[in-house]
Amino acid sequence: MYKFVPFIKYSVNGKVYESGKLNDEHYTLDYTADDSAVKCILHPKTEIELMEFRLTAIRKSSGSEVFFANGYQSWTTTREYSPDDTVNGYIPVAKISDFTKSLAGISGDYHFTNYGEKGRFHSFTYTYFRLGDKLELFGSLNERTGYTIFEVNYPENSFSVIKDVESAKVTGDYELVNVLRFEGGYDEVFDNYFGAMNLRKSKLEHLSGYTSWYNYFQKISEDIILRDLDGLDRAKDSVSVFQIDDGFESAVGDWLEIDEKKFPNGMKPIIDKIHEKGYLAGLWLAPFSAQKSSEIAKEHPDWLIKDNASGKPLLGCVAWGGAYTLDFYNPEAREYIRHFFDVVLNEWNVDLVKLDFLYSECMQPRDGKTRGQIMCEAMDFLRECVGDEKYILGCGVPLGPSFGVVDACRISCDVDLKYTGKYYNKLGVNREIPSARFAMNNSIFRRHLNRRVFCNDPDVFFLRDGNLKFNDEQKLLLAKINNLCGDVLFVSDNAGEYSDEKISLLKKFFKRSDAKILKAEYIGKDSLYIRYTENGGEKTLRFNIATGKSNVESLI
């Protein structure tokens, strides 16, 4: 059993206190720990504003052990690390000023967690230590009072359970930590952990089809969408969903103001044509985002989240020339969001909404609420808006608060149209940048979420030749990993241009896999292998994730 020692930092009437005691003049900590669980409840004796909380124990480990670090949100790099590894946050140039740091770290956790120290790693919501085939998993049952962050510091032989409680104002009993511990094989510990969470079950089991983003980006039109819809006809029996991505609206945030030049007949006739094909109709939205140039941002500045320091609207993302974030706690903003969901889902008759850039709602704590509490309540609000009969595909979202709420979820960053990545991939600007390499990495190391929590969306794969810098081997590798690790299988290609051979490959990769992954790990800086069973036989996929060189062709 671990012997955890508490540390709490808080303020009362503006005065800051720090303590390692279970009982103090302002609080009592009800702490229990055994081999199966760690729990801690705060009983304040007066109103307390929390600043930091952690439980820390001594933990010595073998040099061959690895630590699983679940990244902050969908896009954040997630993988196993050895004690000799170092995970960097910002690139050095980003540290020039507070402004450059805020831009580089806008979608991540860099401003409230630690990076850049050899052998020091952190993981959100759950983690595991793996030695060979044996895992020791720790998983939080409660992110509603704040994110649970597991941190290992190998040089100091320490392991901490941290609660991100910044700005929480507490007057009554407050659950700080509720963590379960499991030991066993890979599938065994994840079955036990997610089984104990008693999550709402997704009604989706598998999605395969089309999304418009990774060929045209915002340059879509009614003609392009209808052409690509017809282009899937030769693979129709393998397709279940057709999703229209960003570009239909006049500005992000003005969701019901359709770009009439691109879509002169509006959205409803296109949704009807998707249904005529027998597919679910999907639509991309960033429900909390309001582009700087949008009418909603100009007309309702009072609906926008304000920066705690400056009081000015808080930048929620750098896309589209910058976007602010609607404060869903604002009653009028809530009604606006409810209204456009009602039109999209009930008037246009969209079946699935892909909801993106959700992290922006909880970039900073506010109004006595922690980041985790805000994100959990925001996700509950979105589920309420969408209802139980329609589907949510989450994206750009911290994963813990999405558990039991979304039906499917992106578990990787965006892929890039160039396999080796653009200049910003080489710079390593942050851990959320688009990259085929990092997308495949995340698909592998978050594979345990698929079919246990939601349908994993590993992002798209490609079979087309144009508007792409992948060789054939790299295309097959990405498609194979997506099929092995996910159940949301998308292309953005115009399949009408495919040869018969590519149509056959498309059907193969769209099919729900019966594969069972036995083991997957790095065996060098860029070399990985995945050992799995499929169609009654055992196979091994070996590849260099940096170059895309692999034995994938022999496995298809």
Image (tube, grey):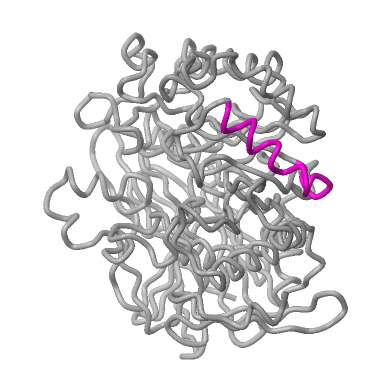
**Residue extending furthest toward the right:** 536
Q: Residue at x 70, y 67 (%)?
A: 484
Q: Position of residue 252 (x, y in %)?
A: 43, 25
Q: Which residue occupies 62% across, 88% down?
A: 132
Percent position (x, y) of residue 355?
56, 35
On screen, residue 207 versus residue 311, left or right, reads right
Front-most of 243 and 148? Answer: 243
Magenta segment's dominant SS is: helix
Q: Which residues are magenta?
A: 223-240
Q: Could you tell me residue 424's position as x and y percent?
A: 29, 58
The residue lying furthest to the left in this view is: 96
- Give the residue at x 34% y 55%: 19
Give the vertical position of 225 relative to 26 (above or below): above
Q: Quadrant of residue 13?
A: top left
Please state the horizontal and vertical placement of residue 508, each as a whole percent of the image.
76, 62
- As for residue 277 lying within the magenta part, the answer is no
- Judge left or right: residue 347 versus residue 252: right
